[in-house]
Image: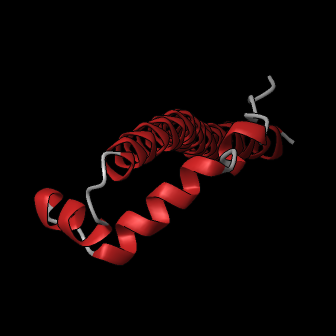
């Protein structure tokens, strides 16, 4: 009977040690997941800000190009001055005429 009790106690101790090792591995895995998720959320926010900045810069460039064209500078010459394709100059000036889709799109915010 004493041997059975000591075997049981030894087995219980071994089981606890194994569980603790598994718990530690699971906790580390969870920390890595949380860290990667946090980094992704920060990157998504930075990306959203960059997209908004790009949309603003594109609109400003389009307006400036329209000013150049209004001064009777042909699209080809404006493109050469800015080292752009003529098609890009035309696209940017047309984009300045309509609101950007990024301006109408609500920015998603992460929830806790």
* Residue furthest top in the image: 112
Q: Residue at x 37, y 69 (%)?
A: 88
- Which residue is more in the foreground, 109 or 4? 109
Let me know if residue 25 appears in the view.
no
Measured from the top left, where is residue 102 in percent x and y?
67, 44
Colour scheme in use: secondary structure
Measured from the top left, where is residue 49 in percent x and y?
51, 33
Residue 24: which quarter of the image?
top right
Measured from the top left, where is residue 15 in percent x and y?
70, 45
Left or right: 60 as drawn, with respect to 105:
left
Q: Residue at x 42, y 47 (%)?
A: 66
Left or right: 5 as drawn, with respect to 81:
right
Q: How many marks?
A: 0
Say which quadrant the C terminus sits in: top right
* Residue furthest right in the image: 1
Q: Residue at x 39, y 47 (%)?
A: 70
């Amino acid at each position: 009977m004493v041997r059975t009790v000591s075997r049981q106690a030894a087995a219980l101790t071994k089981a606890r040690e194994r569980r603790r090792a598994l718990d530690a591995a699971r906790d580390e895995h969870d920390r890595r997941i949380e860290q990667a998720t946090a980094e992704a959320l920060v990157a998504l926010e930075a990306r959203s800000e960059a997209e908004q900045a790009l949309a603003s810069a594109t609109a400003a460039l389009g307006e400036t190009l329209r000013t150049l064209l209004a001064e009777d500078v042909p699209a080809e010459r404006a493109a050469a001055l800015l080292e752009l394709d003529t098609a890009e100059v035309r696209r940017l000036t047309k984009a300045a005429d309509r609101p950007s889709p990024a301006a109408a799109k609500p920015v998603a915010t992460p929830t806790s």
